[in-house]
Structure formats: C-alpha cells, structure tokens
Amino acid sequence: MTKRDWDDPQYKAWRMTVKKRDGWVCQMPGCSSKKALKVHHIITWARAPSMRYDPGNGITLCRKCHDSISKKETHYQRVFLAIASKNNGKRKGS
C-alpha cells in the first residue's frame, strides 16, 4: 500500500497512540499548542514502509508547525526521533 487510507483502523490507532504518548501537545521545540494536532511521520511514509505504524516514527505537531516543516522534513528528522524516543521512554515508565 503506497496511498494512505485515513480511515484505516491501523492508521487511526497509530495516530491516536502517538498523540496520547505526546500528551496531546505539539512537540516542536518552542511550541506547546494543543489545537489542530496532526501526527507527522518522522521518516516519510514513502521512504519507510516498514515504519508506517511504528509510534517511534511519529510525532505530534500542530497544523502551523507541521506546515512550517513542509519540504524540510529531513532537517528535523534527528531532533524528532530523539523527542519521540524520549516520549516513548516516559510512556513505558508511567
């Protein structure tokens, strides 16, 4: 599957898991918005088919932050992976 099905139960569950893990807050450094949240694939959907539903490959961003990184995703990849990893550790320890 290369095209996303936004209604796919597995895709919906992945998005919900990431938002819960991130405390329903935008994870972009310096932002703490709780509105218009999206779940962003850190390593893109097209480049990492095996990681499409891995919560460690997702991060919660508000619409403004998500739009601001468009076409610059690789620039943020390392920092987003670190944030997701840190948040995964917090979730496991809760």
Image (cartoon, helix red, strand yellow):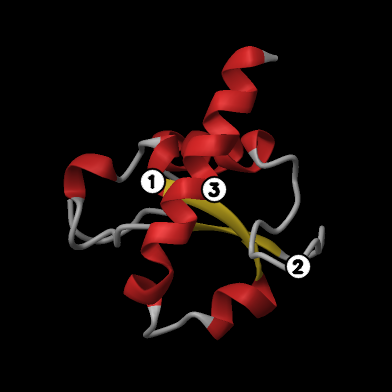
Could one spot residue 41 in this view of the protein? no
Q: CA distance from mark 1 to mark 2?
A: 20 Å
Q: Please name the residue shown 62% across and 62% down the image.
A: 61
Residue placed farthest to the top in the image? 93
Q: Which residue is mark 1?
A: 57
Quick check: 14 above or below 71?
above
Residue 40 marker: none
Q: Measuring from the top left, give residue 70's x and y in whole percent.
A: 45, 83
Q: Which residue is mark 2?
A: 31
Task: Confirm or deny contact between disc 3 and disc 2 (CB under 8 A).
Answer: no
| Residue 2 located left or right of residue 74 | left
Task: Confirm or deny contact between disc 1 and disc 3 (CB under 8 A).
Answer: no
Regarding mark 2 in the picture, which secondary structure is present there?
loop
Instruction: Work out whether residue 53 or residue 8 is closer to the camera in this orientation and state it.
Output: 53
- Label 1 or label 2, whichever comes before in sequence order: 2
- Label 3 or label 2, whichever comes before in sequence order: 2
